[in-house]
Image (spheres, helix red, strand yellow):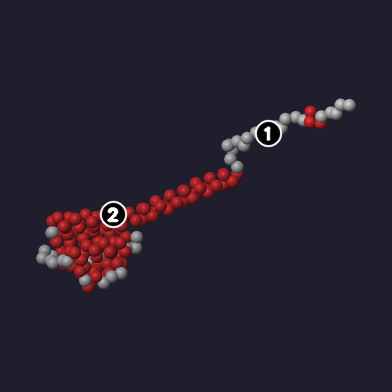
Amino acid sequence: MSVDNPLVNLKDIHLPPPVSFWPPAPGWWILAVLLITSLFFGGVWFFRRYKKRKPKTEALRILKDLQILYQNSKDEVVSLRNLSNLLRRTALTFYDNDAVASLQGSSWLEFLDKTGKTKEFSQGAGKVLGNEVFQQKVNPDMNALFPLVKKWISSSRH
């Protein structure tokens, strides 16, 4: 008697083809769209932030150059006028031109005090930036003025 082997009729196992790289699954498409969207909006946000902070950064760089120029020349009158010019240009950039352009004397100093949240312009070392800036004989405290102007630029609304 011969016993038939039941395994003789089996066929080889056929594996499915490997998963292809392309096209990706829907989850990867969603992730890619979210990533690209977030990169785009993040880039726009950083660009706007850079553009908004650029005038302040530039004003602080000019202030640093003016301080180096003063340390080399020790010319107080020229340095005082340069500081006044820098403050005026910065204020015109940061605030409404109609409100700033016509200010002079004590109203200019009050504006600087109000926007800088200080009293140093109308009552302290910054008082010299009022009407005295146009006089030939003036004795400003330049060691107090440079930090005061830097503080005003740094604390301005932009």
Left or right: where does residue 36 sit relative to residue 12?
A: left
Few, some or many residues within 10 Å of mark 1 (<14, 14–19, 20+)? few
Point 31% across, 57% down: residue: 56
Left or right: where does residue 149 sit relative to residue 3?
A: left
Q: Which residue is mark 1?
A: 15
Q: Is residue 105 at least partly visible in the picture? A: no
When asked about the image quadrant of residue 107, the answer is: bottom left
Q: Is residue 9 above or below residue 95?
A: above
Q: Amino acid at mark 2?
A: Glu
Q: Which residue is mark 2?
A: 58
Do the numbered discs 2 and 1 sit on residues whose CB atoms are within 8 Å?
no
Residue extending furthest toward the left: 137
When asked about the image quadrant of residue 104, the answer is: bottom left
Residue extending furthest toward the bottom: 123
Point 42% across, 53% down: residue: 45
Q: Nearer the viewer, residue 83 or 144?
A: 144
Q: Is residue 72 at least partly visible in the picture? A: yes
**Residue 72 x %, y %:** 14, 55
The C terminus - image quarter = bottom left
Residue extending furthest toward the top: 2
Secondary structure, mark 1, is: loop
Left or right: where does residue 17 sit relative to residue 5?
A: left
Dot placed on the residue nearer the N-terminal end, 2 or 1? 1
Point 79% across, 28% down: residue: 8
Q: Nearer the viewer, residue 152 or 131?
A: 152
